[in-house]
Amino acid sequence: MTYSIDLRKSVVLYVDQGGSKAEASRVFNISLWCVNNWCKRENLAPKEYPTDRKRKLDWEALRRHVSEYPDAIFRERAKYFNVHIHTIEYAMKKMKITRKKNSTVQRKR
C-alpha cells in the first residue's frame, strides 16, 4: 500500500522548511529511504506498474486443452505448451482446476 500524496507533500515541505531528513523520518514515522526518495522526485505521485503482463502460457488455451484432453498429465501439457511442469501446476491451481480423480477404478488390495 502506498503513502498518500498529502503525506508525501507534508514530508517534503517539512524538509524544505529546514527540518532534517532524519527528523522528518521520525516525526512522520516513515523510513529515511522514503524521505530521501521523495525529496529527489519532481512528481510525488506513486509510480504505476503494469498489472497485466504478457505471460508465456495462455490460460484460456490451457483451459481448452484440459477440456479436450482431460486424461493428459502435467508433463504432457507442459510439453505441449513448451513450459515447465510447475507452470502448468501453478496455472491449474489458480484456475481451480483439479487433477483427474477417477473413482471408478478400484485398487486391488
Image (cartoon, rainbow, N blue to C red):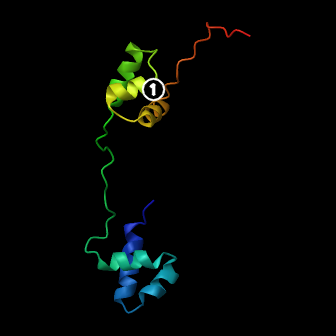
Q: Is residue 30 left or right of residue 63?
A: right
Determine whether 27 is above or below 7 in the image: below
Task: Residue 104 in the image: state x and y as whole percent.
Answer: 61, 6
Task: Residue 91 in the image: state x and y as whole percent.
Answer: 43, 33
Look at 57% across and 17% down and name the residue there: 101
Q: Quadrant of the C terminus?
A: top right
* Amino acid residing under circle 1: Phe
Task: Residue 96 in the image: state x and y as whole percent.
Answer: 50, 28
Look at 37% across and 25% down and name the residue there: 62
Determine whether 5 is above or below 101 in the image: below
Which residue appears farthest toward the bottom when viewing the image? 18
Task: Report which residue position mark 1 lands on.
Answer: 74
Look at 41% across and 19% down and name the residue there: 66
Q: What is the tally of numbered marks visible in this picture? A: 1
In which quarter of the view is residue 49 placed? bottom left
Determine whether 70 is above or below 54 in the image: above
24 and 96: which is toward the camera: 96
Q: Secondary structure at mark 1?
A: helix
Look at 62% across and 11% down and name the residue there: 103
